[in-house]
Amino acid sequence: MLHDSIPGTDKLLNSERVSGYIGFDPTADSLGVGNLVQVMTLLHFQHAGHKPFVLMGGATGMIGDPSMKSEERTLLSADTLEANLAGQKKQLERFLDFSGDGAELVNNYDWFKGIGFLEFIRDAGKHLTVNYMMAKDSVKKRISGDDREGMSFTEFTYQLIQGWDFYWLWKHRGVKLQMGGSDQWGNITTGTELIRRKAQGEAFALTTPLIKKADGTKFGKTEKGNLWLDPRRTSPYEFFQFWLNASDEDVKNYIRIFTLLDRATIEGLETEHDAAPHNRVLQKTLARDITTRVHGQAELDAALAATDVLFGKGTVDQLKALSGESFERVFVGAGVPVADVPRDALAAGVNVVDLFTDRSQLVASKGEARKLLTANALSVNKTKVSDPKQTIGLESLISERYVLLQKGKKDYCLVRAV
C-alpha cells in the first residue's frame, strides 16, 4: 500500500536485493498497534527478498520527532531509552528474521555519541539551507499555528539528525532506501537530499498511508488509550478483541495490511464474509492471525477461551486449561473486577451468599443473592449454584488461586486468594 515514493524506487526494488530501513521512536518500552503498519512493511520487504534494517532512535529519542505533533515531547533519560529499546527489540523479533544475513537492528546513538556539535553542523548543517528545512510541513504547521511558543531549535534540527541517519547507513551499510509513514516524507527526503548534496549519491524513499478507521477515529486507540503489543500493558484478550470488533469496512483493509495471506485467500474470505457477515469470518481470521504472531498460540487459546467464557457457553474445563498468569491477565484485561479473599478464609469455607455479597460485592444484598440462587442465576466457575448454605473452599480454586463468580449472563467477578 503505497502513498508516495521517489521516482526510480520501483525500478530499484525490481532489479536487486535492496537494503532499506525504517526508524522507530523508543518513547515507550513497547511498540503500539500503530507501529504495526511499519513493522509489517519491513516484514513484506524481507519476504520479497530484500534486507530490512530496523533503526532504533536511541539518539533521536532524546529529542522527539515534531511530525504530526502540536507540542514538544518530554525528553527521555538514557536509562529509560535503553529499557525501551530492549522491550521493542524483543517484540520485533516475533516478526522479522534476524538470523544470518537477515534483518539487522541498529541504534543511531552508536554513531551520534562520538559526534560533537561543531563537527555536526560543519559536516551536515552546511549542506541544507534554512529555507529548505523551513519548507517542511512538520515545521510550517508548528511555526504558523496558534501555538505562540512555536518550535524549539532542538526539534527544528530533528530532520537534519534523521537525514544524517540515512547518510550514515547509506555510506557505511549500503542502505539505499528509507521507508515510513506518510507523515515522515519530509524527514526521509531530507536524508536523500543530504546524500545527494554531501556525497553526490543517490538514495530512495517510500512511504505508506497513515491508517485511519472508517468512523474517523484514530487507529490503534481504545477507550483505555493506546493498544500495546506488550501483554503487561494490553492483555492478549483485549488485543484479540480489538481486531475481532473491527468494522466490516475496516477489516477488509486491515487483513491486507496485517497478515501475510495471499490475494486469492483474502478474496475467498471476503466472498464468504459478504454471504454471512454475522459470522465475522474476516474479523476472526485477522484476530487469530495477528494475536498468534504477537503473543503466541497459548495466549490466543487463552483469549479464545475467555471469549467463550464471557460471551458464550464456556466451561469449567476451559477455565482450568488457562495458566495462572493467563487467567488473571485475561479476565482483568477484559474488565472483570477482582476481589481479594484471604486464603485462610477459603480454607475454612466461605458461605456462597457471603462470597457473592460481602466478599465480592457482585450482588448488592444477601436477600437478592438468595433470590438469584433460587432462580439459578448465580454460577461459580461456570457451574450453577442454588444452595444458600453451600460453602466455597480451596478445592474450588483454579490455578490454586482463582474463583470466577458470575451473576446472570454478563456480570462477573474474579475472586483471588491472597
Image: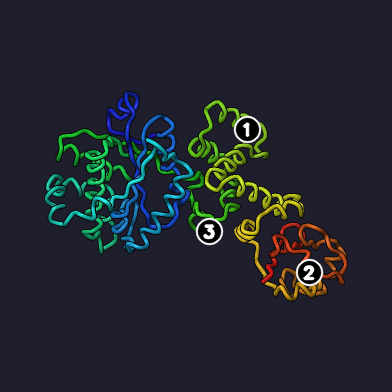
Q: Which residue is mark 3?
A: 232
The percent coordinates of residue 383 (x first, y second) are 81, 58
User: Does 150 sit left or right of 92 as displayed?
Assistant: left
Picture residue at 71% right of the left edge, 49% below the top: 308
Label 3 SS: loop
**Which amino acid does the dot numbered 3 rest on?**
Arg
Which of these two is toward me, 14 or 110? 110
Q: Is residue 229 visible?
A: yes
Q: Which residue is mark 2?
A: 393
Query: Mark 3 packing: few (<14 Cα in 10 Å), some, or many (20+)?
Result: few
Picture residue at 28% right of the left edge, 58% below the top: 63
Query: Mark 1 packing: few (<14 Cα in 10 Å), some, or many (20+)?
Result: some
Give how far apart the Cα atoms at labels 1 and 2 are.
Answer: 49 Å
The percent coordinates of residue 301 (x first, y second) are 65, 47
Tag 2–tag 3 contact (CB < 8 Å): no
Label placed on residue 3: none
The percent coordinates of residue 115 (x first, y second) are 18, 54
| Quadrant where the N terminus is found in the figure | top left
Label placed on residue 274: 1
